[in-house]
Image: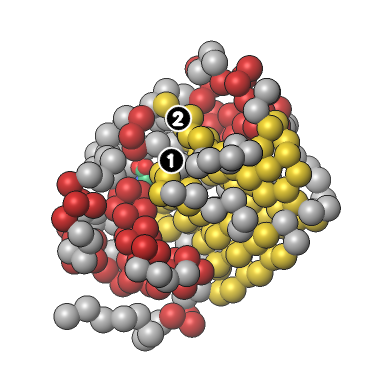
Amino acid sequence: MCRHLAYLGPAVPLSAFLLDAPHSLAKQAWAPADMRGGGTVNADGFGVAWYPRAGPPVRYRSAMPIWSDAALPRLAAVTPASAMLAAVRSATVGMPVTESAAAPFVDGRWLFSHNGVVRGWPQSIAGLAADLPIEDLLTAEAPVDAVTLFSLVRHQMRAGKRPEEVVPSLIAEVARVAPDSRLNLLLTDGTRIIATTWGHALSVRAGDGAVLVSSEPLDDHPSWRPVPDRHLLVATPSSLSLTPLGDGFDGEVPRRA
Ligand code: GLN
């Protein structure tokens, strides 16, 4: 299943994460080390988004494998970023392989990625999606579970809720209507990273005014720590919190009429 990563800290060329590290995102695309629940390579597209000095985030994505993009090495080498999110995709069976289905998905300053699967999509989650404005459904970027999750997160954030609250309650709701789903979500607004583990691998490296969250460690630096399954991670360059999901949410899931 997909691999994703997010970084906050001193400006570093995108290539450091995407291509140069010993276990870079490109390496994780063709030789992932900790795929869980199926999938062998992440060849169904990739995307990266970062924050320029001014203005909204810039996104570069493709339906092609990350290793086949001839423009990426030079582009990434000359593009420093102090905040970024990137993903390589292994499309869930039955979901289209298109550029529009490749993360990151973007809303204003928020970047979003999903590693996993919503079991029984779309029927299982149709009841939750019924709360979305018709315009959001009509303009959804692609018919894939990740975009539905993105639409649900975005809708609640637009209603004024904090992503730190939206994400755990969404996981609980989706887990209720679509049991056995895998829901590793990753979000950033360039100032903080919000991530979940729910069925897939995730590691974090924090220190020296930087934080890097990645499906798999990019190198053998000793400060990488695995994030336990069913946890919410909230991090800034100077803070890191891990909160269990799961039991604490059982029975507290808002019920829908
Ligand atoms: N289900 C999502 C998709 O098809 C994510 C897949 C994954 O994590 N491999 O895009």
Q: Secondary structure at mark 1?
A: loop
x and y percent of residue 153 in the render?
A: 37, 60
Give the amino acid at mark 1. Ala
**Residue 141 falls left or right of residue 189:** left
Disc 1: residue Cβ within 8 A of ligand 1's nearest atom: yes
**Residue 221 falls left or right of residue 73:** right
Of callouts 2 and 1, the N-terminal one = 2
The residue where tag 1 is placed is 103
Disc 2: residue Cβ within 8 A of ligand 1's nearest atom: no
Residue 146 showing in the rendered view:
yes
Between marks 2 and 1, how big is the CA–CA gap? 8 Å
The residue where tag 2 is placed is 61
The residue closer to the viewer here, 133 or 120, is: 133
Residue 175 showing in the rendered view:
no
Q: How many marks?
A: 2
Residue drawn at point x = 48 percent, y = 62 percent:
198
x and y percent of residue 179 in the render?
A: 32, 66
The residue closer to the viewer here, 14 or 21, is: 14
x and y percent of residue 62 in the render?
A: 42, 26
x and y percent of residue 84 in the render?
A: 59, 42
Label 1 Cα neighbours within 10 Å, binned few <14 / some 14-19 / many ≥20: many
Label 2 Cα neighbours within 10 Å, binned few <14 / some 14-19 / many ≥20: many
The residue closer to the viewer here, 27 or 69, is: 69
Give the amino acid at mark 2. Arg
Residue drawn at point x = 56 percent, y = 21 percent:
72
